[in-house]
Structures are given as structure tokens and as C-alpha cells.
Image (cartoon, rainbow, N blue to C red):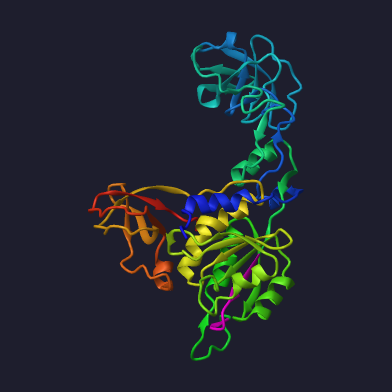
């Protein structure tokens, strides 16, 4: 059976995702969430002509070298100056304060000198006005943030400046993680001579949290149908991620259990490495399931390519892998028939050029290699051998 490409497999998975319900979220808790409704400005920003500097609010017609103006008041941020400035007059003003009626320009304090109840100007008539006009940032009624936008501190500042205390976002999905295999024990527990510690469970929980979901660990299921089914039935989640049991060996029982329980598989393997056994299904009740291979590198590479986009889609957003080009530090052999994601180290050299060095070992079970890498080199099927200095596509995971 011909396996789908990474792109086609991801498209199949995403096509079946229905976004979760929306809820009002306080701004301080909304970082990383996706908007379900637009954020619209309720008024102009700034809501008045504001000073961009400390200085003197004046009329432009009065600005000339040596002009002496009578001081008639003061305008500070958050306060009404309480005065209308006439010709021949000036008001002390501070950054962010509203220009008093009658004024249209600020002479900065470095270009003026106070003498008792007057101020003498040293500003040229054609100098800067140092005024932020009303609405120069945005106007009332403007859509500031569109649905499907992922919030970050900068966008939250924009929503706050529009007066919003809450934003309407899709609910964060609860992502259950089920590790499977008789060989696994939890980190910190006694391990038998033929057992290994579960590296994927904690790593994927961190990945889910960074990707905008709420992780929950279902523990470890043994390699038998009853144990797997009991763990799945007991979980409360919007998306289930299983780890291990994804291949075709006698002890790989996860897919048969899901099928026997009424699940429908739509992806059964992808033409990639590492991660060929990755699969996708819907449980009998419609909830999605992503099946990851058990090797840590395979699981985390597949998480970057499939899990992050699924978490985003459940919230009405997108999370395409962040890719770019980098210069190879050394030669690279030709690639085989599957798309290959090679663990690598990328950095900027002294010349400012982004360079990448694939790790010499690419075995998907090597956790040390995975931990040392900070990028993935993407190689297309049948890609030719490359010499040092060639440009390659690089995916830099968000860490």
C-alpha cells in the first residue's frame, strides 16, 4: 500500500477536525489561545490629540525663534488642562497628555527656556509638531484582531488598549497522552532489567502545553487489549495521543483495539522517517486520536508535524511548521524514498549566515541526539547528495 506524504497525511487529519466551543477568557489568561471572534475598537486610540514629548503646547502661528509666550496652565497625562490657549500663550505639557484646546503643536523642552511666567522659544517654525493625532493608532470600529489569530503578549496589549477585559477564544483542548508497552515504567519508579523509562509521556505533555493545549497523562497501558481499552475508556479528553503499539508486530495492539471498539482509521502510516508508523483515527464517539511511534525522536518529530496543527485546528487556528533555509556545514548523502527529518544543530555563524549541521547519528531511539539537536533538516524523497555550502530546508521547533 502506498503511504501518503507528510503534507497529504496532515491535510487528511485536519479535514476531519471540528473546532471546540468558544468561551470568554480574561486577558491575563489568554496567551497562546486562538480568537473565536474579532476584537473591535470601541473608540479612537489615542482618543485625543496627544503630546509625544515633554515641552510646551502652543499655536503653530506663534512659533518663531525668540518668541516669548505667556504660561497659562499645565496639561498632564490623565488630567484636563482646564484652559484654552490663546495666541501669545503656552501651556506646560507632558508626554501622553492631551493638547489643550487652541494648540496644535508641542515645542520640546530642550527648545524652550522658562523665564518666570513666560517661556522663550528656540524652535524653528518648520520643526516637528511632536503631536500624536487622535486615532493615529486605530479608529473606533476598526477590527484589530481577526478570528483565528493566536494571541501573544503583543496582541494582548492591543486588545487591552481597545478596552477589552476579556476575549472570546476557543476552549483549550484537553489532550490525553497514553503511553503503551510492557517495557515502560514511569521515571522515578524501579525499573526491571528489561524495562526502560517512559521518555515520551512527560515530553509530549510539555509539547502539548507549549502548543496551546491542556495535557493529561493517562499513564502506561500494557500490551494487551483489556489494558489499552480500559485506559482509553477512562480518559476525559478532546484529543487522544497514544504512544507506541503503532507498528505491525504481534504486540502492537493499539490499532486493533481502536478498530474493535468502533474507531475509524483514516491515516495508517506516512512516507517519512522517522515516524513511518504514525496513524490517525476517530473513536466511535467522534473524538480524534493521533497514534505516535514509541521511539522518542519519532514521537516528537511527528508531534511537530501533526500534533501541533491538530491542537491549533481544535481552536480554529493553524500551526504550520516554521521552516526556512540554512547553509550546510558539511556534505550530505542522497536521501531514500521517504521524506526525512534529520536532527540537526542550527546557528548563526560569525558572518551572520545561518548554518546547519545534521547530527552524525540519526537513530530514532537516541534521546541524547534528540536533546542536543535544535532543528530538523527536511529532505524530500530521492533528494540528491549535497556538498558543504548547499542550502537546505530547516524546521526550527519552538522551544
Q: In the orientation shown, which residue stands out farthest toward the bottom?
A: 193
Residue at 54% across, 77% down: 198
* 181 magenta-colored: yes
The mark total stands at 0
Horizontal arrangement in the rendering, residue 287 relative to residue 303 (left or right): right
60 or 172, which lies in front? 172
Q: Position of residue 204 (x, y in %)?
A: 56, 66
Tell whether 202 sits left or right of 377. right
Q: Is residue 36 above or below residue 173?
A: above
- Residue 120 rendering spot, x and y as whole percentages: 55, 17
Displayed quadrant of residue 285: bottom right
Q: Is residue 378 above or below residue 343?
A: above
Kindly identify the residue that appears in the image at 61 percent across and 72 percent down. 256
Of 355 and 85, nearer the camera is 355
Q: Considering depth in this image, is 10 or 71 the residue closer to the camera?
A: 10
Q: Residue 242 location in percent, x, y? A: 60, 69
Residue furthest toward the front?
1
Which residue is depicted at the point 40% across and 57% down?
376
Question: Is residue 112 on the magenta stretch?
Answer: no
107 relative to 254, above or below: above
Judge whether 216 appears above or below 45 on screen.
below
Magenta-drawn stretch, dominant element (helix, strand or loop): strand
Q: Quadrant of residue 37?
A: top right
Residue 360 percent across, percent down from the top left: 30, 67
Q: Identify the residue at horizontal 74%, vertical 40% (top origin).
A: 164
Q: Which residues are magenta?
A: 176-185
Amino acid at each position: 500500500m502506498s503511504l501518503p506524504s507528510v503534507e497529504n497525511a496532515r491535510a487528511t487529519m485536519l479535514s476531519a477536525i471540528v473546532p471546540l466551543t468558544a468561551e470568554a477568557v480574561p486577558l491575563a489568561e489568554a496567551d497562546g489561545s486562538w480568537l473565536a471572534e474579532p476584537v473591535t475598537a470601541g473608540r479612537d486610540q489615542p482618543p485625543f490629540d496627544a503630546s509625544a514629548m515633554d515641552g510646551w503646547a502652543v499655536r503653530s502661528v506663534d512659533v518663531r525663534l525668540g518668541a516669548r509666550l505667556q504660561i497659562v496652565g499645565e496639561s498632564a497625562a490623565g488630567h484636563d488642562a482646564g484652559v484654552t490657549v490663546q495666541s501669545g500663550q503656552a501651556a506646560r505639557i507632558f508626554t501622553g497628555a492631551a493638547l489643550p484646546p487652541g494648540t496644535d503643536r508641542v515645542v520640546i523642552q530642550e527648545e524652550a527656556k522658562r523665564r518666570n511666567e513666560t517661556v522663550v522659544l528656540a524652535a524653528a517654525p518648520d520643526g516637528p509638531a511632536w503631536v500624536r493625532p487622535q486615532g493615529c493608532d486605530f479608529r473606533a470600529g476598526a477590527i484589530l484582531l481577526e478570528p483565528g489569530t493566536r494571541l501573544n503578549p503583543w496582541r494582548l496589549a492591543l486588545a487591552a488598549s481597545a478596552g477589552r477585559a476579556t476575549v472570546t477564544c476557543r476552549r483549550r483542548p484537553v489532550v490525553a497522552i497514553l503511553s503503551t508497552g510492557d517495557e515502560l515504567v514511569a521515571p522515578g519508579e524501579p525499573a526491571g532489567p528489561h524495562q526502560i523509562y517512559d521518555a515520551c509521556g512527560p515530553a509530549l505533555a510539555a509539547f502539548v502545553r507549549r502548543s496551546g493545549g491542556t495535557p493529561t497523562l493517562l499513564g502506561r497501558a500494557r500490551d494487551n487489549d483489556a489494558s489499552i481499552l480500559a485506559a482509553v475508556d477512562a480518559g476525559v479528553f478532546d484529543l487522544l495521543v497514544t504512544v507506541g503499539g503503532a507498528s505491525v508486530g504481534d504486540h502492537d495492539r493499539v490499532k486493533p483495539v481502536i478498530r474493535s471498539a468502533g474507531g475509524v482509521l483514516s491515516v495508517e502510516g506516512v512516507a517519512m522517517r522517522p515516524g513511518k508508523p504514525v496513524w490517525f483515527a476517530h473513536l466511535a464517539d467522534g473524538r480524534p486520536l493521533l497514534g505516535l511511534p514509541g521511539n522518542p525522536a519519532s514521537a516528537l518529530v511527528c508531534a511537530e508535524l501533526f500534533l501541533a496543527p491538530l491542537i491549533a485546528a481544535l481552536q480554529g487556528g493553524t500551526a504550520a511548521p516554521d521552516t526556512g533555509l540554512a547553509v550546510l556545514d558539511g556534505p550530505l548523502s542522497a536521501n531514500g524514498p521517504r521524506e526525512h527529518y534529520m536532527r540537526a544543530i542550527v546557528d548563526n555563524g560569525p558572518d551572520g549566515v545561518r548554518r546547519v549541521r545534521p547530527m552524525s547519528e540519526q537513530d530514532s531511539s537516541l534521546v541524547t541526539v534528540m536533546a542536543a539537536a535544535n532543528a530538523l533538516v527536511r529532505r524530500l524523497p530521492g533528494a540528491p547528495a549535497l556538498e558543504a555550502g548547499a542550502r537546505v530546508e530547516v524546521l526550527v521547533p519552538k522551544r
